[in-house]
Amino acid sequence: MATKGYWVSVYPAISDPEMLTAYDRLARPAVQAGGGRLLSRGSRVVAHEAGITQRVVLIEFDSFEQAVAAYESEAYQKALVALPGSVERDFRIIEGID
């Protein structure tokens, strides 16, 4: 059985909320087409240690490979065009555990 994959995005700074909205309009269907399920897009965050309280997004995929493929998809790459200069984002694809 494949282990799940997750996209974890943390947004330390959002300088252009309209561009982030434009990205979201393109990214959401691309993520869904890639099999992703939005688990959290929270702005309510309690941070500890070196954590930050800004927006955190968590998306689950059925496998790590599916998560990587969704990121590399043409549709998602088109969504990424909206981000440069509009946000500072810490993005990771991580493998879940059994």
Image: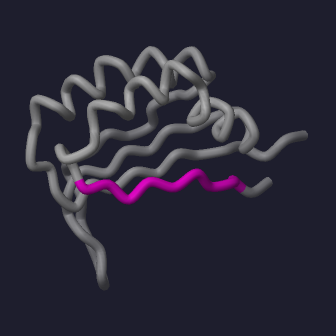
Residue that appears at 48% across and 26% down:
76
How has the structure been colored for display? Answer: one colour
| Residue 15 in the figure: left or right of residue 47 | left
Q: Residue 51: x and y, percent?
A: 29, 74
Residue at 85% in and 41% down: 2
Residue at 51%, 24% in the rendered image: 31
* Residue 86: x %, y % from top left: 17, 44
Quick check: 18 left or right of 54? left
**Residue projecting furthest to the bottom:** 49
Residue 9 % position (x, y):
39, 51
**In the image shown, does 86 or 10 lie closer to the viewer?**
86
From the viewer's perspective, tell me whether residue 85 is left or right of residue 74: left
| Range covered by the magenta-colored residues | 88-96
Q: Main secondary structure of the magenta part?
A: strand
Residue furthest out toward the right: 1
Q: Quadrant of the C terminus?
A: bottom right
Image quarter of residue 69: top right
Q: Is residue 36 above or below residue 95?
A: above
In the image, is 37 to the left or to the right of 41?
right
Please say if 70 is above or below 83.
above
Which of the 4 image quarters holds residue 66? top right
